[in-house]
Amino acid sequence: MFDKLKVILNKTDADYADIRYELKNETIITFNGKELSRIGSNSTDGYVIRVLKDGGVSSVSFTKETDAEKAIRTASENAKLIAKNIEKPIKFAEIEVIKDTFTPKLKEDPRKVSMAEKLELVRKYNDIPLNHENIIMTNIFYGDLIREKYFLTTEGTEIKETLITTRLGGLITSKDGNLIQNVRVSSGGSNGFSNVRNQEENFEERTAIALDLLKAKPVKAGVYNCIINPDLAGVFAHEAFGHFSEADIIETLPAMREKMKIGSKLGSDVLNIIDNATLPDQLGFYKYDDEGVAVRSTELMKNGVLTGRLHSRRTAHEFDEPISGHCVAEDYRFAPIIRMGTIFIKPGTLNFEELIRMLGDGLYILDAKGGQTAGENFTFGAQYGYIIKDGKIGEVIRDINISGNLYQTLKDITAVGDDFVLTKTGGCGKGQTNIRSCHGAPHILVNNLVLGGI
């Protein structure tokens, strides 16, 4: 394959060019209630070529090798047009030339598991909640995605990397009279099919929560001190903070760029945030991004001070900051953009019982349920929670919505637990879909959270 890609690249007269060929295999199984609504596999492939010419950058995707010359011409013409219509020519940060082939170690290869076995496993999990009287619906899916990527540049880099992702999850919906509640269930990862085996207890526990929420009280609106569980804290790290650590998000926003200067004191002294996609066996793991840059662990915040940022080659040159290896494409249809890999709040020193005692009176809020950000303000839903009284966990609460300002909330994080959980399934919809975007955290204690409710 590299020989074919070299022939294509040799036809360019660009200052720089790269080409990525990808073979993509996907399997999907979906249940809606008892009904098997979707089952199948498909295989697709294609190319994307990117050209830097006269200070302009353009990319073109195509699926037939015979369309390569046309794609090169189009990309070159568009790059010249872009160069004439921008104030400052685009330049790429210099990187090491790499020649490597990387295939992840798997505990069990999903390609070696039959469709029949996958179907029966998902059916078994789906039946667990449906065996309970007050569970009225499930929406459960299984998917595996195998991406074999070949990447070549005019600088001499040649990389073949395989990414394998398994996902299992969905919604469990309960009903009592007019009250309807739902809870998410999930498992998966990047190191094999074994991640979705032995999930019976997971499905039982999530079903029990969906049923308990039928007896729960809606939260009363107000301002609370809260303990946030790892899932919800990880979503905060990703959505509210992480996107502003992506250089392309802030580079054309002068006010935000000023606030997000390296060295700015943004959070409390106990807060440390890292993006580390080099962690093996985790959902967000990869070795090279789609610019051929080796991903590195990037410290974003230390003791509340902004210390780093996520970059492409272009933004690393623009900001004059270190390249990080965080420029990733959804697949062969897209040029890469800056994406988080595995972003998380680092663990602290306090165990959960100590956090509860510190809280005294407040709320314990668990698991993200949708949300949105608008500039530096955010709104997240939580799946459920508990009232904490005198340092003891009490009754269950539901219908929880959290809102706040990013910078104020960063300062209001007053304690960080010593536990740590990374998501088994993830995703991010910034521009393209990235199902391997991973987040995590320990339990954290946050003061003055604004909660909507009755």
Image: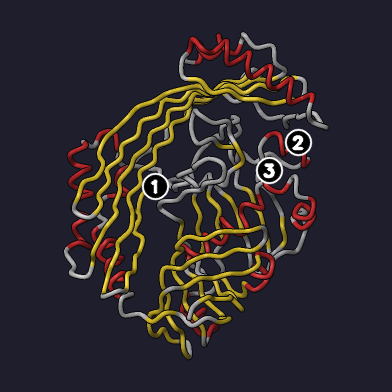
Residue 159 relative to residue 179: left or right:
right
Q: Nearer the viewer, mark 2 or mark 3?
A: 3
Closer to the camera, 174 or 257? Answer: 174
**Label annotation for residue 189:** 1
Residue 218 horizontal/vertical position (percent):
42, 79
Q: Label 3 belongs to which residue? A: 248
Element class at badge 3:
helix
Which x, y percent locates residue 293?
61, 33
**Three-letter code for the amino acid on which mark 1 is drawn:** Gly
Dot label at residue 317: 2
In the image, taking residue 21 as reference, residue 212 lies left or right, namely left
Q: Residue furthest right?
A: 87
Going by the picture, which residue comes out furthest to the front?
178
Residue extending farthest to the bottom is 390
SS of the residue at dot 2? Answer: helix
| Residue type pointed to by label 3 | Asp
Q: Residue at x 49, y 51 (%)?
A: 438
Q: Does the rendering let one see residue 208? A: yes
Secondary structure at badge 1 equals strand
Q: With respect to residue 358, does 34 lie above or below?
A: above
Q: CA distance from mark 1 to mark 3?
A: 28 Å
Amino acid type of the residue tagged 2 in the rendering:
His
Label 3 neighbourhood size at 10 Å, few (<14), some (14-19), many (20+)?
some
Using the rendered view, name the quadrant where residue 15 is placed. Answer: top right
Q: Residue at x 63, y 48 (%)?
A: 298
Gap between marks 2 and 1 measured at Cα: 33 Å
Give the mark nearer the N terminus: 2 vs 3: 3
